[in-house]
Image (spheres, coloured by chain):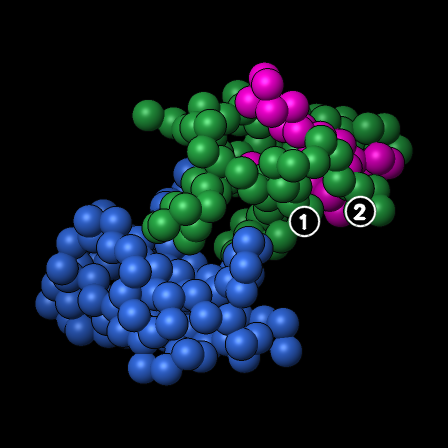
Chain colours: A green, B blue
Amino acid sequence: DQQVKQNSPSLSVQEGRISILNCDYTNSMFDYFLWYKKYPAEGPTFLISISSIKDKNEDGRFTVFLNKSAKHLSLHIVPSQPGDSAVYFCAAKGNSGGSNYKLTFGKGTLLTVNP
Amino acid sequence: DTEVTQTPKHLVMGMTNKKSLKCEQHMGHRAMYWYKQKAKKPPELMFVYSYEKLSINESVPSRFSPECPNSSLLNLHLHALQPEDSALYLCASSGANVLTFGAGSRLTVL
């Protein structure tokens, strides 16, 4: 049972345009959501996060939107740059007991930004 | 220091070998993790240590044995592994909600 879903395995955008990566979740106990970026043969790097009490969080070119009623979040990158090309993982965690430590990842979306 | 350091970066071992992966952080984080990642898959949680005590074991086979000697160090002892255990092993630590990952140890079991 996949609790965090990234239904687009890949996305290709032009440099300077907006990249929108989507993520859906099924577990209503999740209350904190994170996006990680990963290059091949490296560990995931934290990008941005959002608590369930918010609907938007912005950090420079990166904005994450959360729609709790739809159990959907998205990562917007504006403007996209070639260096943003990587696999992006959506992740979620709960806040009680062991779930406080357990980060559940989606399968990832490969973003390619073309010059 | 905002890094998680993992050694070795690459490890090749036979199925009868005993080896260890090491992880170190100096961010004062009290939770440390081992994840396993296969190609084109998301990271999968193996173990969580909280305040140097094993908090979560995701039904990992006993040929993987974690150890947390102190709050900065985390080891993963490997014995009698199978070729299907070949993967990128990621260590992470966290103070609150955000996990900081190391670069990983690429393990190949022959």
- Dot 1: what SS? strand
Split into 4 quadrants, where in the image is the C terminus of chain B? Answer: bottom left
Q: Is residue A62 left or right of residue B4?
A: right
Lateral position of residue B81 relative to residue A17, left or right: left
Q: Is residue B57 left or right of residue B31?
A: left
* Residue assigned mark 2: A59
Q: Is residue A81 visible?
A: no
Crowding around mark 1 (Cα neighbors within 10 Å: few <14, some 14 to 19, many 20+) is: some
Q: Amino acid at mark 2?
A: Asp
Task: List the residue tagged with mark 1.
Answer: A47
Image coordinates of residue A76 in percent, x first then y, are 75, 32
Tell me: residue A35, above or below residue B70. Answer: above
Residue A83 rendering spot, x and y as whole percentages: 75, 47
Q: Are marks 1 and 2 in contact (CB under 8 Å)?
A: yes
Where B69 sits versus A21, above or below? Answer: below
- Residue A18 appears anywhere in the view: yes
The kind of residue on which mark 1 rests is Leu
